[in-house]
Image (tube, rainbow, N blue to C red):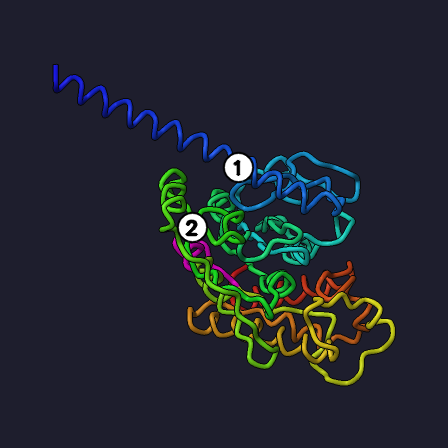
Amino acid sequence: MKHKGLIFAGAAAISAFGLAEGVLRLRDKAAARARYRREHWTLARPWEQFDYRSGWELRPGFDSGSIRINRDGFRGPELGERWGKRILCLGGSSTFGPSGEDAPWPRVLQELLNGDDASAPVEVINAGVTGHTTDNMRFRLDKVGEYAPDVTVLLAGDEDLLADNITRYRDNRQRFSSFWHIESQRSIRCHACSLFLETAGCGERKPSPLCYSPDEFVPFNFEYTLRGILEALIRQGTIPVLVTIPSLVPDDPAPLDEMTREKLNLPVWLNEDAPAAFRTVRRSYDTIVRALAKEEEIPLIDAAHAFEVTALPRHALFEDVFRLTARGCRVLGEAVARSLREEGLV
């Protein structure tokens, strides 16, 4: 009888713990969904939907005429039966692209790689999502890995720069369980245990934000996350290719023309000498992209240089500081196609 009572009590305790964990997980998901609605309701992007892991994803089947999301949740036409090489383009707003189904640079890339030759087709998947930083991207890797791309072209750092306030920069180098836990600094594996520790005053202490000037800033969170993404992609069997970060603000420190200045939407934390400070911070992200490509022996596409040498005016290539126009997507698509051929990847 005594043993049966202990077994019953143990089973009851396990059941209660499981029930509590389930309730807390549902509560956590509801809080994340509420935050998504609160922060995204002004963005007017009906092609996006809440996702508990990555933050938000594209809505499968959405079609407004100028923006089409296929059944797999990627921008562009439906994926065909695979029998050629597959390239996946991962990124944020610049990869998702402007309005017009032929405008995004992944579509330009597919057009340039295939040409009129149907004997060895290349299928390019546009896996860009507006606003996605590397923090969002790392929680998408399982999803995009299901499509087994031969090559994954990764344009990252632009959204990170806009999202990261260097005057209030927190160390996020942890293995978080979802995008929604990064802001709260909670690396949760067991919600019930986490609640118990917090109630007992033994929870993880949140580090104080750090303050940097543009000249001293090093985006170590970006480096940590990007390195993890590259390692995960390699484990999946794809060849990762990094892309340097093109921007409306050129490397040339000469004063910007009026039409370029009208398109500047620089982060509010930049000082009064905004273009010069922005140039310095962008270079810090770009330096990490180049360094990781060299360290991991990963192909690098110098898209930033392609925008420096083009004869087209800067303001015609960008909608704002990072987002590309259709003409800008053409420049980037050409640079990526040329580099992939030079690397022997297509």
- Picture layout, residue 323 above or below residue 148: below
Mark found first going from the N terminus, 2 or 1: 1
Magenta residues span 231-241
- For the residue pair 7 and 274, the one nearer the viewer reads as 7
- Amino acid type at circle 1 is Lys
- Picture layout, residue 323 above or below residue 276: above
Q: Residue at x 46, y 62 (%)?
A: 207
Q: Residue furthest bottom?
A: 254
- Let me know if residue 238 is in the magenta part: yes
- Picture layout, residue 151 above or below residue 75: below
- Amino acid type at circle 2 is Ser
Q: Residue at x 37, y 41 (%)?
A: 196
Where residue 187 is drawn, which disc sits there?
A: 2
Please, what secondary structure does the residue beneath circle 1 have?
helix
- Picture layout, residue 329 above or below residue 250: above
Where residue 29 is drawn, which disc sits there?
A: 1
